[in-house]
């Protein structure tokens, strides 16, 4: 049936039928990707986050669908569709998603290990966290490349204690020392994958000669790329139906 998308009533009918189609494909045909689409539908159209959360979870558990693991983990982290956040559940499902090959899951699992979350039941492990970010970056997740680059720029302290009246004269020890060559490598990959902050950092590295030979022409080139990306973001590109839901 052809729909007239200029007609409000026909658009409503199309959306309703789409929900019916997704429910059939998920519950009767047991197709994992359709179950994930059903959860997206429940989230974006019905705004029923509790049901969406359940469908994401069961699609991950029953069908080992990586994107559903990632979505349920995000729900658990934010407390979406539930009364409160559950960091342990979030970590567990990001772990599942990462094992199933989802780079976004590896990225968020890594961040949970790098960030202090002891009060949420997650022990800080920056070394493992960085290995997960690297896995995510190599699977072409641009944000993971950007975060890794930043960590190699600053280095990772062994003990990140807040000042409590100390003189500040204590020697800082690093679990991972600053490594500008690695920082450059990950910034380059992040920029190639479309991360504008990586491109901006790359420009500065070429300008200063940090981790790479100084090159004013390449510094200008990557500054221009970063600014063009910024203009695209500020231009407010619109999303088509279903784009960005997963």
Image: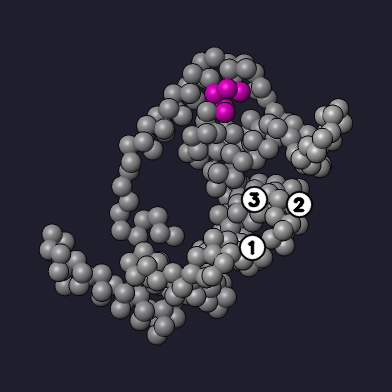
Region rendered in magenta: 201-205
Q: Residue at x 52, y 34 (%)?
A: 197
- Disc 3/disc 1 C-alpha distance (Å): 12 Å
Q: Does residue 114 appear anywhere in the picture?
A: yes
Image quadrant where one finds the N terminus: bottom left
User: Residue tagged by mark 2?
Assistant: 125
Q: Residues within 10 Å of mark 2 (few under 14, many from 20)?
A: some
User: Residue tagged by mark 3?
Assistant: 111
User: Residue tagged by mark 1?
Assistant: 87
State yes or no: residue 204 in magenta. yes
- Could you tell me residue 221's position as x and y percent? 47, 21
Q: Nearer the viewer, residue 159 or 31?
A: 159
- Compared to 107, does 10 lie above or below? below
- Disc 3/disc 2 C-alpha distance (Å): 10 Å
Q: Residue at x 58, y 17 (%)?
A: 207
State yes or no: residue 244 in magenta. no
Q: Residue furthest bottom?
A: 28
Q: Secondary structure at mark 3?
A: helix
Q: Quadrant of residue 3?
A: bottom left
- Could you tell me residue 58's position as x and y percent? 52, 77
């Amino acid at each position: 049936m052809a729909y007239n998308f200029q007609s409000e009533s026909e658009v409503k009918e199309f959306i309703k039928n789409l929900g019916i189609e997704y429910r059939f494909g998920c519950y009767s045909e047991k197709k994992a990707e359709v179950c994930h689409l059903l959860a997206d539908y429940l989230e974006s159209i019905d705004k029923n986050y509790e049901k969406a959360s359940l469908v994401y979870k069961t699609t991950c558990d029953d069908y080992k669908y990586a994107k559903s693991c990632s979505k349920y983990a995000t729900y658990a982290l934010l407390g979406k569709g539930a009364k409160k956040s559950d960091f342990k559940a979030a970590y567990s499902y990001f772990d599942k998603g990462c094992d199933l090959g989802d780079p976004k899951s590896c990225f968020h699992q890594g961040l949970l290990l790098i960030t202090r979350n002891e009060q949420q039941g997650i022990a800080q492990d920056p070394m493992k966290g960085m290995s997960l970010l690297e896995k995510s970056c190599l699977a072409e997740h641009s944000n993971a490349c950007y975060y890794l680059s930043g960590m190699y720029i600053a280095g990772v302290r062994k003990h990140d204690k807040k000042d409590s009246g100390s003189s500040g004269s204590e020697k800082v020890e690093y679990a991972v020392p600053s490594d500008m060559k690695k920082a450059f490598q990950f910034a380059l990959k992040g920029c190639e994958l479309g991360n504008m902050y990586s491109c901006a950092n790359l420009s500065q590295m070429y300008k200063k000669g940090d981790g790479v030979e100084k090159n004013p022409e390449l510094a200008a080139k990557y500054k221009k790329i970063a600014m063009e990306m910024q203009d695209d973001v500020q231009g407010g590109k619109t999303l088509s139906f279903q784009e960005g839901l997963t």
